[in-house]
Image: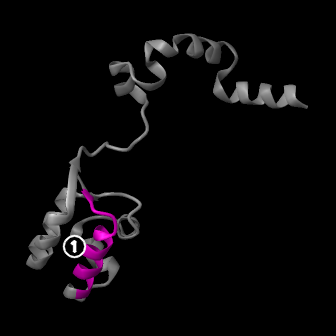
């Protein structure tokens, strides 16, 4: 699960936890069992924080529990990723949607999406 915080509160939570615990970012990442760059991306709010990591922060510092009020929504782990692959094919979503069948045949017969882009550039010149 992913925690969706109010804008800016995920950063405040991580800064509060770091300062309260007196840890470096790398030590905090080790305690949360994640990579340093992942923690940095969470701090910069590029990605939403895992729910398990939030609970580990609460275990490490109980006052972090107050930030639970700022959780707007909980989403599945794969939320926000691009559609595609085997699951999209099974569910007939995105490129595999039946309404895109004609476009899909055209792309395959002409060498794919990148080939069509090349053809468009060649025709403009």
Q: Residue at x 22, y 68 (%)?
A: 32
Display colour scheme: one colour
Taking the image as shown, residue 57 lies to the left or right of residue 30, namely left
Q: Residue at x 20, y 60 (%)?
A: 71
Q: Nearer the viewer, residue 97 or 5?
A: 5
Q: Is residue 47 above or below residue 90?
A: below
Quadrant assignment, res 67: bottom left
Residue 125 position within the rendered picture, expressed as x and y whole percent measured from the top left: 91, 31
Count the marks.
1
Q: Is residue 32 left or right of residue 69?
A: right
Residue range of the region highlighted in magenta in the rendering: 4-19
Q: Measuring 29% from the left and 76% from the top, which residue is drawn there?
A: 12
Q: Residue at x 32, y 43 (%)?
A: 79
- Give percent across and percent down for residue 8: 33, 69
Task: Tell me, yes or no, whether the highlighted magenta stretch contains residue 11.
Answer: yes
Q: Which residue is mark 1?
A: 31
Q: Is residue 96 above or below residue 19?
A: above
Q: Main secondary structure of the magenta part?
A: helix
* Magenta stretch encompasses residue 121: no
SS label for mark 1: helix
């Amino acid at each position: 699960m992913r925690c969706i915080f109010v804008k800016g509160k995920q950063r405040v939570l991580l800064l509060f936890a770091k300062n309260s615990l007196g840890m470096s970012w790398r030590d905090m990442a080790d305690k949360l069992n994640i990579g340093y760059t992942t923690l940095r991306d969470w701090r910069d709010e590029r990605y939403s924080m895992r729910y398990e990591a939030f609970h580990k922060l609460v275990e490490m510092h109980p006052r972090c529990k107050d930030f639970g009020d700022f959780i707007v929504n909980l989403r599945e782990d794969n939320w926000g990723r691009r559609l595609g692959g085997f699951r999209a094919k099974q569910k007939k979503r995105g490129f595999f949607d039946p309404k895109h069948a004609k476009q899909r045949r055209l792309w395959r017969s002409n060498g794919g999406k990148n080939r069509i882009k090349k053809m468009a550039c060649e025709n403009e010149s």
